[in-house]
Image (tube, rainbow, N blue to C red):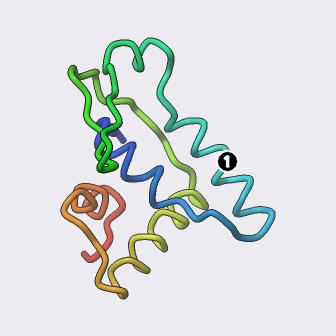
Amino acid sequence: MEFTVEERLAMLNLLPPEGSLLTMKIVHELRQVLAFSDEELVALDFQQHEDGRLTWKNTVEPRVIKPGVKATGIVYEALEKLDKEGKLRENHLSLCEKFEYGE
């Protein structure tokens, strides 16, 4: 699957901060795969604003990421939890489509 900058940031924010040893190993690996390379950071020129917003000046090609079955389940469960709590946001919609949540 290809993931844009927005989707990568949204997914990084979705990942659980705690869980079982297996879950945390998978989350750790997924965070490394989703992280931005030095070249991407230079190209994007991220800006953190005082109000907490994160913006960037340029674009980069979407990154192909192949999450495994367990990683896919973790993201799916995070989307499901947000949905049940009524906390899904517009930036989660493309992730819902890619992870076939709500279909």
The answer to whether residue 20 is above or below residue 37 is below
| Residue 27 left/right relative to 57 | right
Is residue 35 depicted above or below 57 in this figure? below
> Which residue is at a point 30% across and 29% down the rendered structure image?
62
Between 86 and 98, the residue placed more toward the observer is: 86
Q: Residue at x 31, y 77 (%)?
A: 87
Residue at left 61%, top 61%? 70
Residue 50 percent across, percent down from the top left: 32, 44
Q: Is residue 7 left or right of residue 38?
A: left
Where residue 63 sits in the image (x, y, percent)? 38, 30
Outermost residue toward the front in this view: 50
Q: Nearer the viewer, residue 58 or 28?
A: 58
| Between 45 and 36, the one nearer to me in the picture | 45
Image: 92 above or below 1: below
Disc 1 is placed on an element classified as: helix
Residue 30: horizontal and vertical position, in percent? 58, 45
Q: Name the residue carrying label 1.
A: 28
26 left or right of 88?
Answer: right
